[in-house]
Amino acid sequence: MNLNKILKNAFLVVMFGLIVTACATKKSVKTTDSTTSTTTTSAETQKADPIEKLDALMQGDVYVGSDTVGELASGVPDRVFFATNEIILTTASRETLRKQAAWLRQNSDVTVVVEGHADERGTREYNLALGERRANAAKDYLMTYGVSSDRIKVLSYGKERPVDSGSNPLSWSKNRRSVTVKAN
Amino acid sequence: MKKNLFLIFFICSILKPSISFSLVEIDITRGNLDPMPIAVSPFFTNEDSNIKIKNILNIDNLGFEISKVIENNLEKTGLFDAIDKEAFLQKPDIAHLKPRFEDWTLIKSQVLITGKVTSKIINNKDYINVEFKLWDVLGAKMVDGFSLTTTPRSWRRVGHKVSDKVYERLTGESGYFDTRIIYVSEEGPKTQRVKKLALMDQDGFNTKYITLGNELVLTPRFNPADDKIITYMSYFRNMPRVYIVNLQTGEQKVVGDFRGMTFAPRFSPDGKKLIMSLAKDGNSEIWVRDLETNIQEKLTDHPSIDTSPSYSPDGKFITFNSDRSGYQQIYVMKSDGSKVKRISFGKGIYGTPVWSPRGDLIAFTKLHKGKFFIGVMRTDGTGERLLTENFYQEAPSWSPNGRIIIFYRETKSDNDGQGFSAKLWSIDLTGYNERLVKTETDASDPSWSSLLGN
């Protein structure tokens, strides 16, 4: 019994300690109702390492170069690129997807998988969802240009399959992509 | 899966401790800068037992090895400082019977752990019996102890059970040593990473690989109510889906019949439900599936990304992250999906909320100004405290006593992809005692089990 009492007291001391340290912590952050304060930071906007000729290869932070770009068919690029945390298709992306749609309309027996990818600067699960949104953005556009939905599967890889293994803004921009791959 | 992965323990008797308890107690709510000196005597094994055990396990001195397991566990808490065994004046067998306390005081030990290992044969099968005693050196008294019999191969677990007992006795908190960690083992270049499910003891020993690496696997998580059951996500046949695996039988099944990708699974505290995300047509929502009735239900309804759900330990609430405000933030809702409320309002974006097993805190990942943080906040979003900052880290998982958070950290790679690594780390809730958790390969997505059952 005596032992129990002592243990109980020890527990109270520990609990009290918890409360005190919780209150005394230095790192506590003031909460704010402002959502605008978060808009300047995003998963993929780190610009710690300036890369030479970056401007020529990126517009904003969307990759516009041709490195890594393959072909779905002759003269038809296989991929489009996205801005950080975005699923919006750029003018160049839409042009690429219209070429893909035209080719798919001509080759009506072909089915495709649109793979959606994110860069490494986000949490794994969120990036899986983001990749799925990007792949669907591309799929929806292909459908708008006459490719039926049963010919297009989507598959998100999140950040699991980067094409460029660097940890810098240019590498990340190449990895934020959707790739249209022949499935048959 | 090998059947002997989980072995049976028999706790035979609790050695009766003397009543008074004069040990110095340890306050584990602060970073401990002055660890308590502790002496772990090699557990005594007589000649006969030693020979038998060596034949079975090929270990020369099992009693010594068990004492090393205990020492290693206790030292890694940062709360204890194990005294070099070279300094011990008393032999293990005598010390276990009745320590000469002045000998242990002389080497500045406040606490002494002794033990004895004996081989046994029950029904023609080999067992070991391990006796352990915890002594208060200053108070010159035995304060705790037990005796248990188990199969020789689970000898490390004996060391973990002793460690748990000592930790509980000296801190007043429940232990976390007799536990396992399931994680994703990673190998190969960044662009072609091969990932396997791996299971190991909390201290990094007894690693077993659950999958072969043929398909991408992610985010394994223990069932908190049954340490033999896990859930994870697999790209088997290029169909990313959530699975449940019985580690004991190897039986595996896909969860539900969804058109679309299921991911981010977690069990409810009672293990009877599974929450996860379903991504379909460009929208991710959170779903719950009752594993007994197989009824599944959508909990969120919003065109944004809703994912990374985690139950409160009473099962009444779910925390998750959503970008419905424009960027990833943390929300709490009732477990039926009602009363959704945003709780993170600090600068930066917030993800991977995980409810503490104590119920009072939510651990999270935060990205702010290009750095990743692991932190905790109260369940209403107040009292945010950042524990560690790095280039990239995420996926916190709580120790079962809610004192430690394990997570993974990736290093930056150069333009050729060199320099990249993924490792498991742990940090105390205090923000102190950050440690690399050793794994055989690179590792990510750790999940900490509850204290193991039999």
Image: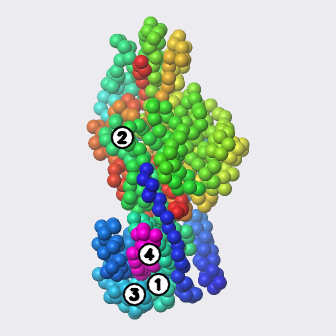
**Cα distance, mark 1 to mark 4?**
20 Å
**Residue drawn at x 42%, y 73% as measured from the top left:** B121
Magenta residues span B113-131
**Cα distance, mark 4 to mark 2?**
42 Å
Badge 4 or badge 2: first in the primary sequence? 4
Q: Give amino acid for label 1.
A: Trp
Q: Callout 3: helix, strand or loop?
A: helix
The x, y position of residue B255, in whole percent, is: 57, 39
Badge 1 or badge 3: first in the primary sequence? 3
Badge 2 or badge 1: first in the primary sequence? 1
Answer yes or no: are tags 1 and 3 on the same subunit. Answer: yes
**Residue drawn at x 35%, y 31% as measured from the top left:** A163
**Cα distance, mark 2 to mark 3?**
50 Å
Q: Which chain letter goes with mark 1?
A: B
Q: Quadrant of residue B307?
A: top right
Residue under label 4: B129
The x, y position of residue B348, in whole percent, is: 52, 45
The x, y position of residue A148, in whole percent, is: 54, 14
Q: Give amino acid for label 3.
A: Ala
Answer yes or no: are tags 4 and 2 on the same subunit. Answer: yes
Q: Callout 4: helix, strand or loop?
A: strand
**Residue drawn at x 52%, y 75% as measured from the top left:** B12
Mark 2 surroundings: few (<14), some (14-19) or many (≥20) residues within 10 A: some
Kindly report which numbered mark, 4 or 3, lies closer to the viewer in this rendering: 4
In terms of secondary structure, what is the magenta stretch mainly?
Answer: strand
Q: Vertical placement of B19 versus B362: above or below?
A: below
Q: Which chain letter goes with mark 2?
A: B
Kindly report which numbered mark, 1 or 3, lies closer to the viewer in this rendering: 3
Residue under label 3: B95
Q: Which chain letter goes with mark 4?
A: B
